[in-house]
Image (cartoon, grey):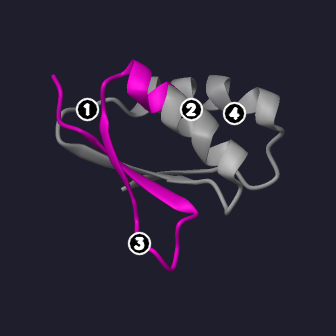
Amino acid sequence: MKKLDLHGVPHEEVPDLVHQFINENWKPNLELNIITGHSDRMRSLVYDVLKQYDLEFVTTDLRNSGQINVQTWHE
């Protein structure tokens, strides 16, 4: 699983980094992991980018809401 860790990244840089991460790792049936930490703003910025790609994503679990798993099931 490919991972992108956004800890310490300024919010204004997040959209570009997420776009780059998706484009560099785009393969059918690949699972990606984006580590956002517990910042609601950071998660929101990541969600906005993922929605542009129409990707399915979930927060890993209630105890660790600082990670988002993304499935690249679209070809």
Q: Are marks 3 and 1 in contact (CB under 8 Å)?
A: no
- The Cα–Cα distance between marks 2 and 1, rounded to whole angstroms, is 15 Å
- Single out the mark in the foreground, 2 or 1: 2
- The Cα–Cα distance between marks 3 and 2, rounded to whole angstroms, is 21 Å
Which label is found at residue 18? Answer: 2
Question: Eyeballing the image, is 8 above or below 52?
Answer: below
- Single out the mark in the foreground, 4 or 3: 3
Q: Mark 1 or mark 2, which is nearer the start of the sequence? A: 2
Q: Position of residue 41 (x, y in %)?
A: 70, 44
- The Cα–Cα distance between marks 2 and 4, rounded to whole angstroms, is 6 Å
Q: Mark 1 or mark 4, which is nearer the start of the sequence? A: 4
- The Cα–Cα distance between marks 3 and 1, rounded to whole angstroms, is 24 Å
Quadrant of the image for the N terminus? Answer: bottom left
* Quarter residue 28 falls in: top left
Residue matched to label 3 = 61
Q: Mark 3 or mark 4, which is nearer the start of the sequence? A: 4
- The Cα–Cα distance between marks 4 and 1, rounded to whole angstroms, is 21 Å
* Quarter residue 30 falls in: top left
Q: Amino acid at mark 2?
A: Val
Q: Is residue 64 magenta?
A: yes
Q: Amino acid at mark 3?
A: Asp
- Which region shows up in magenta? 49-75
Residue matched to label 4 = 14
Q: Amino acid at mark 4?
A: Val
Residue matched to label 1 = 27
Badge 4: how crowded within 10 Å, few (<14), some, or many (20+)?
some
Which label is found at residue 55? Answer: none
Please tell me which residue is depicted at 65% across the width and 23% down the height of the picture: 16
Q: Are marks 3 and 2 in contact (CB under 8 Å)?
A: no
